[in-house]
Image: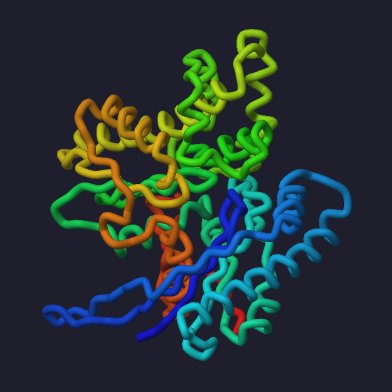
Amino acid sequence: MKRIAGVMTGTSMDAVDVAILEIGETVTLGQIQPELSLRGFFSRPIDAALRETLMELQQRSDDELHRSALIANSYADAVGRTVLEALASLNLRSSDLTALGVHGQTLRHQPRLGYTIQLNAPARIAEATGITVVSDFRSRDIAAGGQGAPLVPAFHQAIFSDPVEQRAIVNIGGIANITWLGAPVLGYDTGPGNILMDGWVQRHLGVDFDHAGSWAASGQLHKGLLAAMLGDPFFSYAPPKSTGRDLFNSAWIETFLCQSAFKAIGPADVQATLLALTASSIANEIGRLESQAKKSGRPRCDRVLICGGGARNAALLHSLAQSINKSTGHPVPVESTEALGWPPQAIEAAAFAWLAHQALSGHAASIPSVTGAIGPRILGSITPA
């Protein structure tokens, strides 16, 4: 049995999340099957000064190379400290772990131009923790013609696939992405998750996020603004597709609000519309995937499982359930992955622990039907302890 930790900060950049997987093997009918369980999960808010500098690097500026190098060191130091804290909280030592899978903080994601940049300093993390680090998971898939994202669907398949029930897994972090556990497995980014809502509430109320979606629930959906936002070309792109803060940011919102038809919309109403945008863009894709499945004689969607920070937004989940029922034409249960024993906040970090295990085992972890690469690839670069 191996213990591997996964580390994720995500588009929202609100915390360093550490999930520790225990990975073993069982033999069933002569076949070796992996056995995965969550040993523990630990999360530490990102220091405000580090978060601010990371946010600044999302925009083009002077002296980016020098600043990126210094901030990468600060980021790595934060990751190293948090990993050691996580181990202490679980009465574990560095020697109890085989490796760390560290995604890094995405600064640019331009797969159409052939590159992606995740801020990281894996050698520094290995030095601080004494643990082998696996990093840079996206580059190989992009080199093979893929989007380099999302990579988590392979992990979703490993822990959530069911021979009877047709499931869709929706991760709502800063960006939302969907995994359709069909044949083949499909997955791609659907658009903004929490990123626009978080930015808007920070701007107007000075808080990090809209707790349970209460501010959005106090506003009124503006159907015209929602329709205009859904008209962005990204939503009509055929998968595979991925996106990030490069597209969906405060400037993106302003391109709509500066139009005369939308200038008078109140801040709470904008928040309500941004929530509806996240729900609608996800639901539209579930309806489209189900329609495609029916044409191939496959079953309709039986259940939607939600992970990521969005699983805590009650108003968003209510809107999402309504939107999915409308897009599919039938009721679909929408619930947190907690229902299957996996805390929704731990899924993405746990996925990078699993991806690290695949890399160390020499097993391909990408799914070409998800990313669009020419074939499956072993993902990640290994920095020995």
Residue drawn at x 54%, y 21% as measured from the top left: 269
Is 288 in front, or is 309? 309
In the rendered view, tell whether residue 12 sits above or below residue 19: above
Q: Is residue 205 visible?
A: yes
**Left or right: where 319 falls relative to 76:** left
Residue drawn at x 59%, y 49% as measured from the top left: 12
**Left or right: where 276 falls relative to 108:** left
In the rendered view, tell whether residue 114 sits above or below residue 356: above
The quarter in which the C terminus is drawn is: bottom right
**Left or right: where 151 falls relative to 57:** left
Residue drawn at x 52%, y 88% as measured from the top left: 93
In the rendered image, residue 238, in percent from the top left (x then y), is placed at 44, 35
In the rendered image, residue 250, in percent from the top left (x then y), is placed at 67, 33
Furthest-top residue in this view: 261
Furthest-right residue in this view: 63
Give the color scheme: rainbow, by chain, secondary structure or one colour: rainbow
In the rendered image, residue 135, in percent from the top left (x then y), is placed at 58, 70
Number of dots carrying numbers: 0
Furthest-bottom residue in this view: 95
The quarter in which the N terminus is drawn is: bottom left
In the rendered image, residue 349, in percent from the top left (x then y), is placed at 48, 64
Furthest-left residue in this view: 29
Q: Is residue 188 visible?
A: no
Q: Can you tell which quarter of the image residue 37 is in?
A: bottom left
Is 114 in front, or is 132? 132
Is 323 in front, or is 207? 207
In the rendered view, tell whether residue 384 sits above or below residue 214: below
